[in-house]
């Protein structure tokens, strides 16, 4: 007698096996992909600690508070997150705080003798950084006697046309100050730095950081001096001091070439201004003045060849408009406006720049010296 199952058609007994095998392959593929992403993410986290690891950033901030500096392999760290830790750990309030972008990166304490300076510059600064840094200082009771607020040419740019979302790291601080000033709270979704965390999954990013580590003769870490052959140094005052290797590249000839090339590329690019951001800055200043804070709206100059190269184009027109807005705020609210977008007005020449818009310490010194009783 033959078992009934022996007579079933082949198609009745095999589909489950086939689909089960396919399902196992899909599941294995998914596991491999997930494991790969986890490895890439873990690699980026480990190789870029001053962007992702709060522990590493707290260690750097603790070095600053103890009076030491910190050498890094790449100066493109998350300065907003580092400032958050630094201000939290500060033992006393600075006399002067500069709030702006990398145009202030070389503003060291030596430029303002007998004053305690904190250069709270960040990469790719926008209007929101002005509110957020003020909130950070207020939150930890570290508001200075003098607060220098710097407006970048894209500071008032509408969010939808911005090229960077790094300002979102300061989302919690920005939203808190916005509420204090009676401004609209954009909500956590619009101010959370999702892009920062999705970058953890970048294979190319991990490769770059790995190569950087392999080539580095010395790892990052605390340092007492302000110079190093291959590592850039963030000082305890917040300023950046470039490596010998970096300085060899940033010649006056490079700055001239970069200024001319950038002017040619940008002369027809417009710089829109969002009125609500202008009003927000006014409210910030109105909040600070009654609290005894000397507010200075400070502008760093462009390399002369860049400034002259865009002067008669839409870019130049828009730059003059941004500058006019800053002066209008100063006049309306009775606060000082220092510096200029024009290097000639500050007294800086072509050799006092690293590129089209980053002045060297000698130029920044002239700007500081132009401010009475600083």
Image (cartoon, helix red, strand yellow):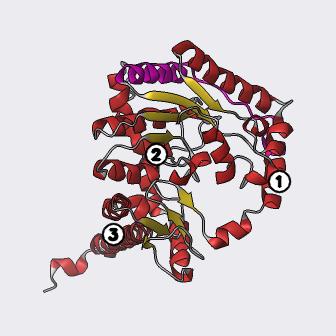
Label 2 environment density (alpha carbons within 10 Å; few <14, some 14–19, many ≥20): few
Q: In which quarter of the image is the N terminus?
A: bottom left
Q: Which residue, given by chain and number where applicable, does mark 2 sit on?
A: 115
Res 303 label: none
Q: Which mark is residue 27?
A: 3
* Cα gap from disc 1 to disc 2, whole angstroms: 33 Å
Question: How many residues crowd mark 1 within 10 Å: few (<14), some (14–19), many (20+)?
Answer: many
The residue drawn where x is 45% and y is 62% is 201
What residue sits 41% from the left and 45% below the top? 169
Instruction: Pinpoint residue 144: horizontal percent, then vertical percent.
Output: 39, 37
Dot placed on the residue nearer the N-terminal end, 3 or 2: 3
Disc 1/disc 3 C-alpha distance (Å)? 57 Å
Residue at the disc numbered 1: 256
Estimate the spatial distance between the alpha carbons at disc 3 and disc 2, rounded to whole Å: 63 Å
Circle 3 crowding by C-alpha within 10 Å: few under 14, some 14–19, many from 20: few
The answer to whether 240 is drawn above or below residue 345 in the figure is: below
User: Which residue is at a point 47% across and 50% down the rendered structure image?
Assistant: 195
Q: Which marked residue is nearer to the observer: mark 1 or mark 2? A: 2
Is residue 360 at least partly visible in the picture? no
The residue mark sitting in front, 1 or 3, is 1
Among numbered discs 1 and 3, the one appearing first in the sequence:
3
Task: Pick the residue in front: 123 or 92.
Answer: 92
Left or right: where does residue 40 sit relative to residue 346? left
Residue 62 placement (x, y as % from top left) = 32, 61
User: Majority secondary structure of the magenta segment?
Assistant: helix
Q: Please state the horizontal and vertical placement of residue 142, each as a whole percent of the image.
A: 33, 40
């Amino acid at each position: 007698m033959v078992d009934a199952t022996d007579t079933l058609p082949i198609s009745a007994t095999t589909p489950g096996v086939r689909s089960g095998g396919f399902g196992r392959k899909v599941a294995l593929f998914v596991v491999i992909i997930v494991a790969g992403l986890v490895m890439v993410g873990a690699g980026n986290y480990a190789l870029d600690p001053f962007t992702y690891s709060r522990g590493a950033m707290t260690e750097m901030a603790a070095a600053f508070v103890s009076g030491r500096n910190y050498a890094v392999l790449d100066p493109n760290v998350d300065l907003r997150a580092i400032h958050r830790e630094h201000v939290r750990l500060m033992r006393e309030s600075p006399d002067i705080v500069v709030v702006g972008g990398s145009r202030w990166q070389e503003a060291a304490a030596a430029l303002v003798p007998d004053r305690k300076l904190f250069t709270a510059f960040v990469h790719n600064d926008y209007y929101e950084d002005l509110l957020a840094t003020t909130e950070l200082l207020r939150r930890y009771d570290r508001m200075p006697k003098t607060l220098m607020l710097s407006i970048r040419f894209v500071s008032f740019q509408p969010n939808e046309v911005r090229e960077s979302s790094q300002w979102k790291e300061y989302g919690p601080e920005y939203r808190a100050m916005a509420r204090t000033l009676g401004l609209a709270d954009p909500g956590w979704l619009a101010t959370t730095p999702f892009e920062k965390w999705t970058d953890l999954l970048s294979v190319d990013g991990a490769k770059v950081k790995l190569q950087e580590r392999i080539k580095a003769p010395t790892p990052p870490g605390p340092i007492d001096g302000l110079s190093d052959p291959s590592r850039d140094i963030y000082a305890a005052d917040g300023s950046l001091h470039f490596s010998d290797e970096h300085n060899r590249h940033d010649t006056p000839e490079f700055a001239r070439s970069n200024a001319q090339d950038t002017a040619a590329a940008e002369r027809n690019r417009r710089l829109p201004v969002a009125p609500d951001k202008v009003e927000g800055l006014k409210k910030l200043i109105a909040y600070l003045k009654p609290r005894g804070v000397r507010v200075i709206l400070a502008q760093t100059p462009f390399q002369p060849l860049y400034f002259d190269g865009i002067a008669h184009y839409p870019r130049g027109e828009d730059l003059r408009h941004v500058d006019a807005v800053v002066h209008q705020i100063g006049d309306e609210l009775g606060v000082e406006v220092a510096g200029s977008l024009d290097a000639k007005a500050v007294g800086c020449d072509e050799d006092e720049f690293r590129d089209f818009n980053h002045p060297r310490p000698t130029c920044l010194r002239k700007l500081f010296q132009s401010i009475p009783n600083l």
